[in-house]
Amino acid sequence: MLLSIRSNFAEAITRRRDEGAALVAVIGVMVLGLIVTSLILASVTSAVGFTSFTRAGMQSQAAAEAGLAKAQSQLMTGNCTGGTYSGADPEYSVVVTYRVTDGGEWLDGCPTVQATEVRLKSSGTAQSSGVTSAGNDVSVVEAIFAVEKEESLNASGPAVYNHSSGVSMNGFTLNPVDGNVPGVTYKNGNFICAGNTFIRGSVTVDTGGATLSGDCRIEGDLIAAGAVTIESTGSVGGTVIAAGVASGLSFKQDNQGSTIGGDVITAGPVHVRGTVTGDIVAGPTGGSSRMTGTTRIGGDLTVAGTLYLETCASCTSAQVVSTLKSASRLGGVGTFGRTGLVVPSRPPVPEWVDFGYDPSKWIASDGLPYAVISVASTDCNWSWEGSPGIAKLRQALASPRPVILDARACQVSMYFPENPKLTSDLVIFAKGFDGGSNVWSSRTSDSKKLWFISPDEVKDGSPPGTCPGSNFVFSSGFRISTSVAALVYTPCVIHNSSTTWRGQMYAKEVVMHGSITLNYVPIGLPGVNLSEGAGEEPPAGASTYRQPTSVRDLSDE
């Protein structure tokens, strides 16, 4: 029995030892599981933190760059108030500073006209913050731009702009300069070109017709809303477009010595006595198109109506085509009774630009405004050598900076008693001008710009019915030399005779009578586009900030 008790006791002790070992093993497994779980949890937490940290950095960086782009675009259009920009979606804040000398002190606020560099510092905030760190929630980016100055001028507009002209041109020569192709534009009225006139450009008539007589030559195109008549040996080097019909005809060429170098495209019948080098398309208006024994057409002849031949009154339209072809006076195909023709289209003619007195529009190439010299109403005796007005004129002529001479207070036309020499660009505002026999030139070797302006202060898209000042008179040898380009603007009439002009003329009416030469150099007016009409352009003389010279990420600083 004693042996049995000892055996049971030994078995119990052995069993307890086995149970203790199992418990240790279980505890070990549990500890190992906790360690593995902790490692996995730490890895997951780290990955989530890194992902959110990266996402926040990308969002804040994108917001900061969006702020830079917004600030740059606003500065380009002249929109800057207080020197800061901000946005909510994405969230950014931009601070603007500038300096006026290279390497100089940065100044807070919107750049002035003297600024040479602009610095934008943009802070962008992430839409979703990082989980484990706020270090990437905000990004800061800095961009520095060199300020590029632009003149306020837009070299636009035709050589001659007539708003309400119905007077004739006689003894007028229009020349291109430096590849600038000149144009003569009539907004209203008829274009009447008399003898001894040579326009080395194109003519556009917006509402009226055109008549060429004598030795009137147009080197480019002639485009008219009405009918076109060419008398005597008048000629057109380009295409003739006649979009109207008068007395049953759209185009009448009344002399065998007349030549059209391009096509003739009309709204109705034609009468051809001379030479048309290109095609003739006459329609959709029907009627009889008249040919003569001297008619020569280099291309096709297409008419909506019928054909009549003066040398064969009984000929049918088909016989007229056959006769012209057999006589080698029709180079292409002859077609009559053609349907589907349309009134020829014409390019738009710009509306009148109302241009008033506003010195802030005149910005020089260095970004600084023009200086202003004013003439009082008591200083307007232009014929007296010692008058204060003449002294002010000489002061403006000697100015080293572009300058405005404001003589609007004078009730008489401005007169120039000597041959003026420009030291810099000059703008003269006055109620009228009497050019006399002056010769305008540059005092230095570089060319200058000159403006004679009688302002139109009423913003209604047309010159006033009554001239608000005096008509401009340029005669008796008045001359703009090759060192100067000049524009004259007036809501009144410009009278020209025996003058040589280099630049442009823009007026209610421009009268050209007797030995006038205009050499076309476009210089335009600030803030407007004379080629397109009365629409304002971006702010005159605005600085530009196209490409940054430096971009830095300041997030870690």
Image (cartoon, rainbow, N blue to C red):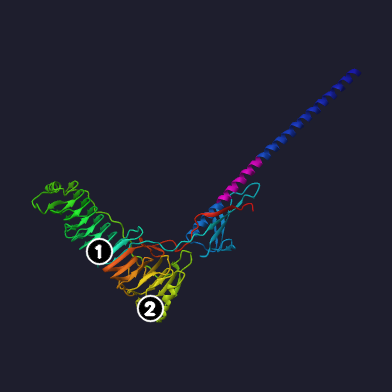
Q: Is residue 123 above or below residue 398?
A: above
Q: Position of residue 396 (x, y in %)?
A: 43, 73
For the residue labelled by badge 1, is the local secondary structure a helix, a strand or a loop?
strand
Closer to the camera, 481 or 95? 481
Give the residue drawn at x 26%, y 62%: 198
Give the residue drawn at x 65%, y 39%: 44
Give the residue drawn at x 16%, y 58%: 255
Q: Is residue 536 magenta?
A: no
Q: Is residue 51 magenta?
A: yes
- Indicate the amino acid at tag 2: Cys
Q: Residue furthest front?
A: 445
Q: Main secondary structure of the magenta part?
A: helix
**Cβ atoms at labels 2 and 1 below 8 Å apart:** no
Quarter of the image for residue 39 reads top right
Q: Can see residue 1? A: no
Q: Position of residue 545 (x, y in %)?
A: 50, 57
Res. 197 mark:
1
Q: Can see residue 80? A: yes
Give the residue drawn at x 44%, y 61%: 538
Looking at the rendered image, the quarter that the N terminus falls into is top right
Closer to the camera, 139 or 197? 197
Closer to us: mark 2 or mark 1? 1
- Indicate the amino acid at tag 1: Thr
Left or right of 240? Residue 35 is right
Quarter of the image for residue 454 reads bottom left
Q: Which residue is mark 2?
A: 410
**Magenta stretch, residue numbers:** 44-62
Mark 2 nearby-residue class (10 Å; few <14, some 14–19, many ≥20): many
